[in-house]
Amino acid sequence: MAGHMTADEFRRHGHDLVDWVADYWESVGSLPVRPSDPPGAVAARLPAGPPSEGDGFAGLRADLDEVVLPGMTHWQHPGFFAYFPANTSGPSVLGDLVGAGLGVQGMLWATGPAATEVETVMLDWLAELLDLPARFRSTSTGGGVIQDSASSAALVATLAGLHRAGGGAWRSSGIGGTRYTVFTSTQGHSSIEKAARIAGIGDAGVRQVEVDPATLAMRPSALRAALAADVAAGARPAVVVATIGTTSTTAVDPLSEIGRICQEFGVWLHVDAAYAGAAAVCPELRWSHAGLEHADSYCFDPHKWLLTGFDCDAFWVADREALVAALTVMPEYLRNVATESGAVIDYRDWGVPLGRRFRSLKLWFVLRWYGAAGLRAHIRSGVSLAQRFAAHVAADDRFEIAAPHPFSLVCFRLKAGDAASEALLDRVNATGRFYLTHTRVNGAYVLRLAVGAPQTAESHVDEAWSALATAATEILAEG
């Protein structure tokens, strides 16, 4: 019977697994980006039940190669161009290792002073790197916190907006008979609709505001009209969610105009910059944040494009008291001297879960390892590679660019139409060398190529274009 792993066993096996991860990173480019096995193949390779006695480490180690790797989609692969990037890096993995080893539960300052204070400082560091408005800093009226994802950030912002819209009544009485409404563009993320469901508003309370067909950004005039219509109908607008870098095309909503409208109607403005927020570490890309000073909350995901492993969403509020008032609950068993003093932050009041991991360690490791210069180089590389790919597309008269591409995503299609474009995606993905996804832009089927994996270089972008161009020739010849 296996007992607790000793320090010596952990040291030995841990070294072996670090070598395994390092070897994986060195070889991932030679693997198919996606598995070819059908659904259920991984489960079929696992025993029907748990072992009656503990397995030796050798068997577990072997199963990583025989069970796990064959069933993986490799998000760190240099040919992974799907969805948005989900970066990780050596410093991030090591930070997670330390956090897991410490095993702290940082729900209160008292249960993990270092976990709390490192997180506060890291969010201030990030705010400085992105040049966020001063009121988002912990030294002002607001502050930052790590959520698990932009979806959780949208939910927390919705709850805070509901609390404010109801004058505090939401916290004690729920939505009651009030018809609260939430607004985002037709390009807004699906998490906004989910947040409205969880909060009790429901799909009927979500307003999808029309966008400019050329830029795919929210029309401020349409937002104003929708807000006014709800107020006239007796509904109570609670939250507007604007986006910096929409999921389909990375469109950027006009925050300055949207922010002034939200102030006029007294509505909480949350800005979702899950993917594109990372770009603001580069001064030349901060134009996308113009008007952010009007926002009540803002988030972006370092786990997308800033070399920090999932999960790590950075979320800021301009007025932390409003957030805490909406979410705080204080049972007797959590009372302690530090909390009662009012001199500390208890992050359990800044999100949905009570329990919290020491996630700021990996962020600290990443920021200290790369520094501002290293992070900017990573972002600029992704943008440059995307523009290189866009130039290939623009030079081929069989293709067209489907949307503006200011960051590291390019949306494109075959002029021959939807069927040809869909066939092109299927054929290129079937090679196993690349992985792209699709969306629809103004009703048309469009391919998305998102650059961001740390190992992706010019050669990989050029090879992807060559594969696309060759496949296009075959598809168009087939007619």
Image (cartoon, rainbow, N blue to C red):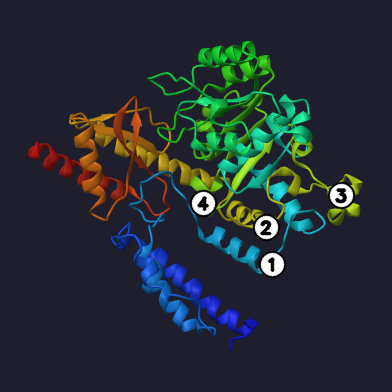
Query: Where residue 339 sits: x, y (%)?
Result: 86, 49
Which mark lies nearer to you, 1 or 3?
A: 3
- The reply to whether discs 1 and 3 touch (Cβ–Cβ < 8 Å) is no
The residue type indicated by label 2 comes to: Phe
Query: Where residue 331 sits: x, y (%)?
Result: 84, 51
Query: Where residue 296 sits: x, y (%)?
Result: 67, 29
Q: Nearer the viewer, residue 222 or 134?
A: 222
Q: Residues within 10 Å of mark 3 (few under 14, many from 20)?
A: some
Q: Residues within 10 Å of mark 2 (few under 14, many from 20)?
A: many
Q: Nearer the viewer, residue 239 or 338?
A: 239
Q: Which residue is mark 1?
A: 102
Identity of the residue drawn at 41% across and 34% down: 248
Q: Which residue is mark 3?
A: 339
Query: Where residue 85 sits: x, y (%)?
Result: 44, 47
Could you tell me which quadrant the N terminus lies in?
A: bottom right
Mark 3–mark 4 Cα distance, whole angstroms, equals: 34 Å
Which mark lies nearer to you, 3 or 2?
A: 3
Q: Earlier in the sequence, mark 4 or mark 1?
A: 1
Which mark lies nearer to you, 2 or 4?
A: 2
- The reply to whether discs 1 and 2 touch (Cβ–Cβ < 8 Å) is yes
Q: Earlier in the sequence, mark 3 or mark 4?
A: 4
Q: Which residue is mark 2?
A: 358
Mark 1–mark 3 Cα distance, whole angstroms, equals: 23 Å
Residue 338 left/right relative to 229: right
